[in-house]
Amino acid sequence: MTEAKITLADGQRQLGLTDTELWIRCLALGGSRDLRRLTDHVYAVSCPDGEEHKVIAQCLNDAFVERGHDHPVAYHHLE
Amino acid sequence: MAKLDADGLAALARSLAAEADLTGVLSRVLEASKTQIEGAEHAGMTALSRHGASTPAATDQLVLVIDDLQYSTGEGPCLSAAADHEPVVIVDDLTTEARWPVFSPGAISHGIRSMLSFRLYTDRVSIGALNVYARQPHAFAADSVHAGALLAAHSAVAIAAATTSADLLAGLESRDVIGQAKGILMERYKVTPSEAFDLLVTASQNSNRKLRDLAAELSDTGALVID
């Protein structure tokens, strides 16, 4: 298992996912936030919701797995 | 040939919006390309993904042959529009074309002399290219280029919307599968929904597999390797 080390925002940026693409992926995984709150969370200075953070991180990590990587996005907020 | 004026564009936009799915939208776009772009004998769409370029829709087999030639050689008007982000690529005569020295002779051998490729994009996404082909040199006049550019702009919006709808539908199906998997784990381990999701996350990390795939497997077979 690779040590998680990048933020949600860095993960989204590296994957090149649009906000809408990420939102649909989160919806598919059980996320319940609307698009605006999702993007606010990704770029938040502090974590607004630990449970939602895990869902977003898993969405991004699934996308990384599709590209041959191993879960680089942290499941908790990084300072 | 119907003139692609404001009324024609409005009718086209409505007809694209009325299509039930992406396949219907692409079919309508290609049909409109042949009827609205004067000189167009064949039409196709180049799509870009992280796996490379492909042709998800074409009016006939010849388009697939010409497009495969571009994808295998890594050059050609469709790729210049889709991958190199040229808004419009105009090919008046492939016999005098110097931009694609490997592709051009191959396309000529299949009888193609003129092409137009229009980049398909929105503010947020780059989709690919809309392409039309003709056997005659200089088949496309300025009006054809203008009509194609208008058609491509409307098509890109419709394709992006249809793609989002398809993704949403797939997302809802996936959400259902994950809900089933969480329910199984909640019952099996007497845990909360959040803890059940954590178990799936741990299994995903330990196996380096997508959570959705593990959830589907669990839902189908009852099996989940967590450690």
Image: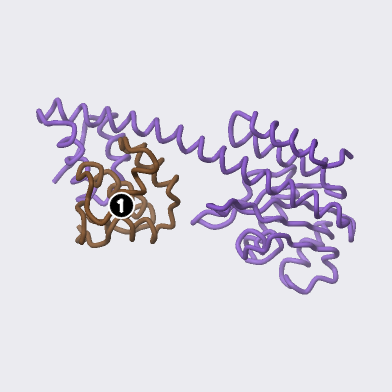
Instruction: Look at 27% across and 59% down and name the residue there.
Output: A7
B167 over B186 or under it: above or below: below
Q: Which colour scheme is used?
A: by chain
Which image quadrant is residue B24 in? Answer: top right
Name the residue nearer the viewer: A33 or B20.
Answer: A33
* Residue topped by disc 1: A61
Q: Position of residue A69 (x, y in %)?
A: 32, 59
Which image quadrant is residue B112 in? Answer: bottom right
Left or right of B216, for residue A51: left
- The amino acid type found where label 1 is placed reads Asn
Left or right of B48, for residue B198: left
Name the residue nearer the viewer: B133 or B22.
Answer: B22
Which of the chains is purple?
Answer: B
Q: How many marks?
A: 1
Q: Where is residue A76 in the image (x, y as percent from the top left)?
A: 19, 52
Q: Is mark 1 on a helix, strand or loop?
A: helix
Which of the chains is brown?
Answer: A
How many neighbours does mark 1 have within 10 angstroms: few (below 14), some (14-19), or many (20 or more)?
A: many
B125 over B96 or under it: above or below: above
Name the residue nearer the viewer: B112 or A35.
Answer: A35
Instruction: Look at 34% across and 45% down and name the residue there.
Output: A38
Which image quadrant is residue B109 in? Answer: bottom right
Q: Mark 1 lies on which chain?
A: A
Left or right of B155, for residue A79: left
Q: Where is residue B143 in the image (x, y as percent from the top left)?
A: 86, 52
Instruction: Look at 85% across and 68% down and name the residue there.
Output: B95
Split into 4 quadrants, where in the image is the N terminus of chain B?
top right
